[in-house]
């Protein structure tokens, strides 16, 4: 995907990738360091799963990637996070603009209390899109990509709360896709859903990765094994030490012969 | 625990259950009785006075029209000052205020404002708006005084309504690249609107019925219809007070008639707001 961006007066066409490079990333809340020393790369147009027991910092790390941690008072992020080579914590990067490139889907479906159409159009309208035809096109495209168009295409005026839980979550995916992000962060997107809806979300993820980088936090290891290309295992070994990355690798390798004995212990269900 | 003891505990619990149901039910019933008793008696005493003449004529011709108009403008003025300030302050407290000493001071001030007796607001209004700012005894002075009295109610209910909006929605909006203000304006405020409207109406209803704050700041026993915000006016609560305390010629018919008009006016606004609210709420459930 190529996109034209204006930079210092020139229109620069850059190849949009959506690859992250994390160097020595740490997160602290006040005096307490929650996550430290994370080094990993997240490949473009692939699915990377973050797994690990509760409290291992998966969601905290995820929220660093679109700077949602900035919204919580007293959170400090250390180290460097590069998105396609650009430091997303440098002074030049506006978190608001960053979030249009790095979308997020949350654990519980959280559609806005408005119509299906207005939900999907919210992002584009935020960035000034007003033209009705243009909005219509974005709404349809986003709903199609989230595999929801078949079900709601004819009733876009319907209130979002009238949709089922699974449909609401796919609506949230469509809403996030409407700003044309390079990356989609998903924080346990299927954990509040029934198995069939969960399956539909997984199918949607498989469709999406051809043009969006996906980073997904999940508690469900079978899910991680099914949908991800690479898996990162995080762990907090004791409460007086920050959580960290144990290892990251090709998903098949991680689930069959991981390098680290702790990874093996976790995926075979010996703890967590 | 033995079975017999368990059984006796269950029996005691059942008795307590029954007694508590009765006690709380009786309390609720007495509230209903008080409300209906009050409204019923008001209707019984006030209804005979209501006539077109009563509603549209000046006091000299047996009407209360100037008092209705005066109360109307006082409430409009109060709304004009207290709604923007009150709702904005509520938004600040819920959405922007950091936890800390400064916020605690703001909250303490609001609590104190809510605790001040209304006659003290009247004195404050007299000293500050009437005399210091030189607004005289006028709709403007009265509205500003009533606004001070109404503010704590509006701020507190606004803040409360905003807090009920799930954090998830704010997160979703921010994650889409919306700024804080856009998130508040497009997502949080619409979701909280029913609660904010309820609080505002509650505050303004109270303002409409207050006598003490307008006593020294806005009202006069007999005044013509106002032509500007700097005019003094008649007002329903004050008219009731004056008519009820006439030593030689008490006017029960006018007193009860005015009281009914005041309560009916406030009720109509409340009913309209409640209808709108229930329609808005049907869509918004978490």
Image (cartoon, rainbow, N blue to C red):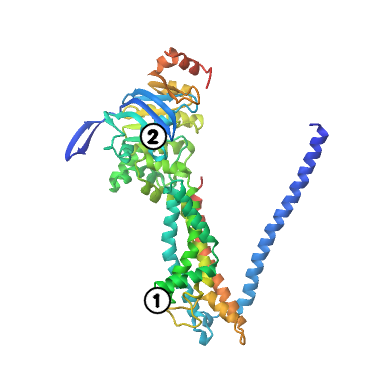
Q: Residue at x 72, y 57 (%)?
A: B26
Question: Helix, strand, or loop for circle 1?
Answer: loop
- Residue B53 vs A44, above or below: the answer is below
Q: Which residue is mark 1?
A: B230
Most foreground residue, A39 or B60: A39
User: Outermost residue, right direction?
Assistant: B4
Q: Position of residue B164 (x, y in %)?
A: 50, 48
How far apart marks 2 and 1 lie (CA) works out to: 55 Å
Residue ID at (53%, 17%): A270
Q: Which dot marks residue A76?
A: 2
Is residue B91 in sight in this rendering?
yes
Q: Residues within 10 Å of mark 2 (few under 14, many from 20)?
A: some
Q: Residue B16: image x %, image y %?
A: 76, 47
In which quarter of the view is residue B34 placed?
bottom right
Q: How many marks?
A: 2
Q: Residue at x 76, y 44 (%)?
A: B14
- Which label sits on residue A130? none
Residue in the foreground of this view, choosing between A49 and A83: A83
Question: Which residue is more in the foreground, B196 or A224?
Answer: B196
Describe residue A35's horizontal placement relative to residue B238 as left or right: left
Relative to B215, is B168 above or below? above
Residue A150 appears anywhere in the view: no
Give the chain of mark 2.
A
- The percent position of residue A48, horizontal first and vertical second, equals 38, 24
């Amino acid at each position: 995907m190529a996109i034209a961006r204006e930079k210092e007066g020139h229109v620069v066409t850059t190849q949009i990738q959506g690859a992250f490079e994390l160097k020595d990333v740490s997160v602290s809340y006040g005096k307490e360091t929650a996550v430290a020393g994370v080094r990993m790369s997240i490949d473009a147009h692939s699915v990377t799963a973050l797994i690990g027991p509760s409290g291992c910092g998966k969601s905290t790390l995820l929220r660093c990637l679109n700077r949602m941690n900035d919204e919580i008072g007293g959170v400090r992020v250390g180290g460097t996070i590069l998105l396609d080579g650009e430091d997303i914590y440098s002074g030049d990067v506006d978190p608001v603009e960053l979030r249009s490139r790095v979308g997020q889907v949350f654990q519980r479906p959280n559609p806005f209390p408005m119509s299906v159409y207005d939900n999907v159009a919210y992002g584009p309208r935020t960035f000034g899109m007003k033209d009705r035809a243009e909005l219509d096109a974005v709404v349809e495209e986003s709903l199609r990509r989230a595999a929801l168009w078949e079900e709601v295409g004819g009733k876009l005026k319907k209130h979002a709360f009238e949709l089922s839980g699974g449909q609401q979550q796919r609506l949230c995916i469509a809403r996030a896709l409407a700003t044309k992000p390079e990356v989609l962060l998903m924080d346990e997107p299927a954990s509040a859903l029934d198995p069939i809806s969960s399956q539909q979300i997984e199918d949607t993820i498989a469709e999406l990765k051809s043009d969006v980088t996906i980073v997904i936090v999940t508690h469900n290891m079978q899910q991680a094994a099914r949908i991800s290309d690479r898996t990162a295992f995080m762990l907090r070994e004791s409460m007086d030490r920050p959580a960290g990355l144990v290892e990251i690798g090709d998903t098949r390798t991680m689930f069959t012969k991981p390098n680290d004995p702790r990874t093996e212990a976790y995926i075979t269900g010996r703890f967590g | 625990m033995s079975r017999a003891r368990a059984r006796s505990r269950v029996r005691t619990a059942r008795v307590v259950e029954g007694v508590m149901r009765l006690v709380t039910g009786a309390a609720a019933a007495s509230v209903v009785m008080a409300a209906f008793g009050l409204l019923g008696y008001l209707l019984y005493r006030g209804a005979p006075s209501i006539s077109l003449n009563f509603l549209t004529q000046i006091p000299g011709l047996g009407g209360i029209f100037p008092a209705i108009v005066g109360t109307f403008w006082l409430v409009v003025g109060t709304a004009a000052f207290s709604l923007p300030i009150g709702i904005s302050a509520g938004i600040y407290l819920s959405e922007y205020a950091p936890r800390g000493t400064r916020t605690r001071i703001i909250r303490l001030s609001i609590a104190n404002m809510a605790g001040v007796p209304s006659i003290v607001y009247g004195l404050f209004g007299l000293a500050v708006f009437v005399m210091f700012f030189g607004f005289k005894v006028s709709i403007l002075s009265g509205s500003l005084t009533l606004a001070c009295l109404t503010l704590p109610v509006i701020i507190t209910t606004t803040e409360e309504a905003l807090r009920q909006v799930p954090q998830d929605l704010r997160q979703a909006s921010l994650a889409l690249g919306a700024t804080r203000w856009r998130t508040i304006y497009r997502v949080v405020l619409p979701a909280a609107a029913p609660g904010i409207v309820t609080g505002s109406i509650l505050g303004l209803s109270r303002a409409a019925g207050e006598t003490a704050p307008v006593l020294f700041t806005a009202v006069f026993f007999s005044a013509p219809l106002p032509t500007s915000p700097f005019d003094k006016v008649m007002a329903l609560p004050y008219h009731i007070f004056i008519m009820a305390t006439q030593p030689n010629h008490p006017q029960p018919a006018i007193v009860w008639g005015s009281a009914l008009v005041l309560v009916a006016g406030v009720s109509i606004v409340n009913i309209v707001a409640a209808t709108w609210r229930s329609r808005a709420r049907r869509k918004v459930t978490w």
